[in-house]
Image (cartoon, helix red, strand yellow):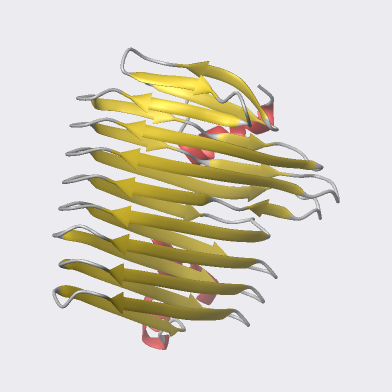
Amino acid sequence: MNKTTEEILRIVSDWKGSFCGAYSIREDGKGIARMSTEHVHITPKEDKPGLDIVIDDGTKGESLAIPACVTHGDVDDLVYNDFFIGNDCDVTIIAGCGVHTQTGEAARHSGIHRFFIKDRSKVRYLEKHIGLGNGTGEKSIDPVTEVVLGEDSLLDMETSQIGGVTRTRRVTKGIVGKGSSLIVHERLMTEKDETASTEFSVDMNGEGSSVDLISRSVAKDDSFQEFRSVIHGNAPCSGHSECDAIITGNGRVSASPQLDAACIDASLIHEAAIGKIAGEQLLKLRTFGLTEEEAEARIIEGFLR
């Protein structure tokens, strides 16, 4: 792998020269390294770019890393990864992505991930995105995540975009079965003239199902963010959607949470808050010797943590 790939891996997947467990590393549209384990099986698709990942029933305490790296301009990488998680599993999946360009040519990665999670399983999913390089070419990352949860299972997703991505459209769709839960915590920061669109759509079809969608974001400079979420309560269930955004400079944020209840015992809540950093917060930190810029950075860091 090249040095840019190594840099991206360190940032998005905490790579320290190797991975512990199964992994597949993608560089500029091609798989460059892959390893399965006894219970985690990674197989390249035959009909399109991507992987089929099968995790055996009863697999616990294992991790899987599938980072994707675009290291230069004039690359438009599209990949389809399907995850088939068996019954009674407890696993962690790391799926970071980075795009890098030093030229005026665009660099793009689009990852379509589908999760089919059977009964009584717990999956922790971590996805970190970043744009790097000093080139003027557009750096785009467009992730699509589709989830189907069986009974009494959990998918806990933590997604973040930590800077440098010019354009992004982030789509998450879920179907939640009886007694199962979907948790999504998103952290997002845009600056300069970057744009970001987040779209959530979840169907709670099983009795006792639940969803918790939380997005925290910061829009700086002349950037723009759009947040759309729809929760469909089709059974006795509980759902919560929250968008909390900070604006600095000329940043703009549009938030539209939507709730659709088709069952009398569906309990659905949404929250949305957009505002600037409170002046008293800045003043308090400046009394400790920080400049205004340092104080603002410290507040944003804590907010997105």
Q: Quadrant of residue 268?
A: bottom left
Asked whether, in this view, residue 63 is left or right of residue 141, the answer is left
In which quadrant of the rendered image does the C terminus lie? bottom left
Asked whether, in this view, residue 61 is left or right of residue 197, the answer is left
- Of residue 276 and residue 280, the one placed in the foreground of this image is 276
Q: Quadrant of residue 236?
A: bottom left
Report whether residue 296 is seen: no
- In percent of the image, x 63 and y 36: which residue is there? 69
In the figure, 10 relative to 204: above or below? above
Asked whether, in this view, residue 232 is left or right of residue 129, the answer is left
Question: Picture coordinates of residue 167 (x, y %)?
Answer: 66, 61
Asked whether, in this view, residue 128 is left or right of residue 221, the answer is left
- In percent of the image, x 76 and y 44: which residue is there? 101
Q: Quadrant of residue 32?
A: top right
Question: Picture coordinates of residue 262 (x, y %)?
Answer: 25, 75
State the residue lying farthest toward the right.
Answer: 104
State the residue lying farthest toward the bottom.
Answer: 279
Question: Picture coordinates of residue 133 (x, y %)?
Answer: 72, 46
Question: Picture coordinates of residue 251 (x, y %)?
Answer: 60, 79
| Number of callouts | 0
- Of residue 1 and residue 42, the one placed in the foreground of this image is 42
- In percent of the image, x 34 and y 70: which residue is there? 231
- Of residue 151 and residue 42, the one placed in the foreground of this image is 151
Report whether residue 181 is seen: yes
In the figure, 80 relative to 220: above or below? above
In which quadrant of the rendered image does the N terminus lie? top right
- In percent of the image, x 48 and y 42: which residue is there? 113
